[in-house]
């Protein structure tokens, strides 16, 4: 690997670390962060690790006005032997660059991004929590920083990585969540930005989530933007269904986020010789399967959410209770295998793990 010469400035006083069995998601941040700047005339320059601190930005910075930004999410895990490891970081870096391309942000050399992640996590290794189900969430992101109000790609950017020790994403933990099908708003359409991990997709989704949160639903299930007929994804995860033994997930159609956990689930199922199809799935198909008693399991898959069983799906006021709101056998097996590999408790036949 290329040895990037990032300068390191350490904090004078370290923060008190939160108790690892009391972690929620994304509320605590470590002592240091990585930053590298970009200027159109210089490329990416001055990669550095500095104390975690607020950013000073010109109020005309283009990120504030036109939302030219992308982000990623991956995790570092502590193994029982005390090693720290990453799960498929190259996949996140590839996707970061695909999002960059869609948002007219310059590419970041994948080896540089990986070296920055590894170096920062190495410095913050004491922050990787040890309690069951916890990890160190890694949030790389890029923002447009040129002070300019014209609508055009920025000529300056910052690529930043921050770290957050996390527990479960949902308050339900690993227990089934309730999801409501959204039939008013849409998340994305083909040709839009749905495939990119960019802030606007999430900002635009908040209104739908707020609408259902009061009724106890964790998130919404998005339908396609043309006919509001076909299933796309859930707020922060891709979605899978098990119907009469068949595992199905919406195909990547240009408006769905290509999840790393989604890809891993598909690879695991194939490895187990369990048939899985990526295809167009009508909501009606799910409702009919439910009515016939054939909807056996539903679950979400995402880095933050891991494998999150869906215990209830609501549509137009009707509630479909799935698998008696219990975690299904397949969801459990996927959760255990995936986290087993991530935490170094079981073998990784796929070469998904990268040690720090
Ligand atoms: C992730 O799963 O890492 C995500 O980025 C989802 C999210 C918390 C927005």
Image: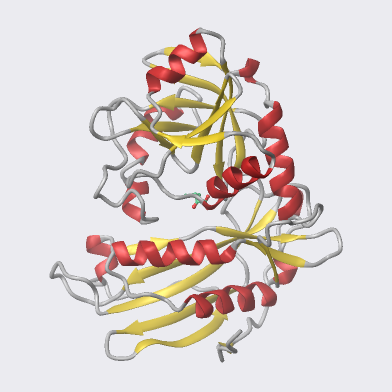
- Looking at the figure, which quarter contains the N terminus? bottom right
Residue 301 position by quadrant: top right
Residue furthest toward the right?
81
Residue 278 versus residue 15: which sits nearer the camera?
278
Residue 46 percent across, percent down from the top left? 45, 89
Q: Position of residue 161 (x, y in %)?
A: 51, 70
Residue lying at 62% horizontally and 28% vertically, measured from the top left: 176
Q: Is residue 106 found left or right of 109 in the rendered image?
A: left
Camera-side residue of 234 and 56: 234
- Name the residue furthest top: 292
Q: Quadrant of the C terminus?
A: bottom right
- Residue found 52% across the figure and 85% down from its top: 48
Residue 56 visible from this viewpoint: no
Q: Is residue 36 left or right of residue 261?
A: left
Residue 63 or 228: which is nearer the viewer? 228
295 is higher (above) or lower (below) than 123: above
328 w.r.t. 103: above or below: above
The answer to whether any part of residue 244 appears in the image is yes
Determine which quarter of the picture holds residue 275. top right
Looking at the image, what colour scheme do you see? secondary structure
Q: Residue at x 58, y 73 (%)?
A: 117
Q: Position of residue 206 (x, y in %)?
A: 36, 40
- Against 30, residue 258 (above or below) is above
- Is residue 277 shown left or right of residue 156? right
x 79%, y 67%: residue: 83
């Amino acid at each position: 690997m290329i040895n990037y010469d990032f300068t390191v400035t350490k904090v004078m006083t370290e923060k008190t670390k939160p108790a690892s069995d009391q972690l929620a998601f994304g509320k605590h941040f470590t002592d240091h962060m990585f930053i590298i700047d970009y200027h159109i005339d210089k490329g990416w320059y001055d990669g550095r690790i500095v104390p975690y601190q607020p950013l000073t930005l010109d109020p005309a910075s283009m990120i504030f006005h036109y939302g030219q930004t992308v982000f990623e999410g991956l995790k570092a895990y502590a193994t029982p032997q005390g090693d720290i490891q990453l799960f498929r970081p190259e996949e996140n870096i590839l996707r970061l660059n695909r999002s960059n391309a869609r948002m007219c942000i310059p590419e970041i050399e994948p080896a540089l991004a990986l070296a920055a992640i590894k170096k920062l996590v190495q410095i913050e290794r004491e922050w990787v929590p040890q309690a069951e189900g916890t990890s160190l969430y890694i949030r790389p992101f890029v923002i447009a920083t040129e002070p300019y109000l014209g609508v055009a790609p920025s000529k300056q950017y910052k690529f930043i990585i921050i770290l957050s020790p996390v527990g479960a994403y949902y308050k339900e933990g690993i227990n089934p969540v309730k999801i409501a099908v959204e039939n008013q708003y849409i998340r994305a359409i083909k040709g839009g930005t749905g495939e990119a991990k960019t802030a606007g997709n999430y900002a635009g989704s908040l209104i739908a989530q707020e609408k259902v949160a009061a009724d106890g639903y964790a998130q919404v299930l998005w339908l396609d933007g043309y006919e509001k007929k076909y299933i796309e994804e859930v707020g922060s995860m891709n979605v899978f269904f098990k119907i009469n033994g068949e595992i199905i997930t919406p195909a990547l159609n240009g408006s769905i986020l290509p999840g790393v956990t989604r890809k891993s689930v598909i690879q695991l199922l194939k490895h187990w010789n369990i048939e899985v199809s990526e295809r167009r799935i009508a909501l009606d198909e799910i409702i009919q399967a439910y009515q016939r008693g054939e909807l056996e399991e539903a679950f979400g898959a995402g880095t933050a959410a891991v494998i999150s069983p869906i215990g209830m799906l609501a549509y137009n006021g009707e509630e479909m209770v799935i698998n008696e709101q219990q975690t299904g056998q397949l969801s459990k097996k996927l959760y255990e295998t995936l986290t087993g590999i991530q935490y170094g408790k079981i073998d990784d036949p796929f070469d998904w793990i990268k040690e720090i």
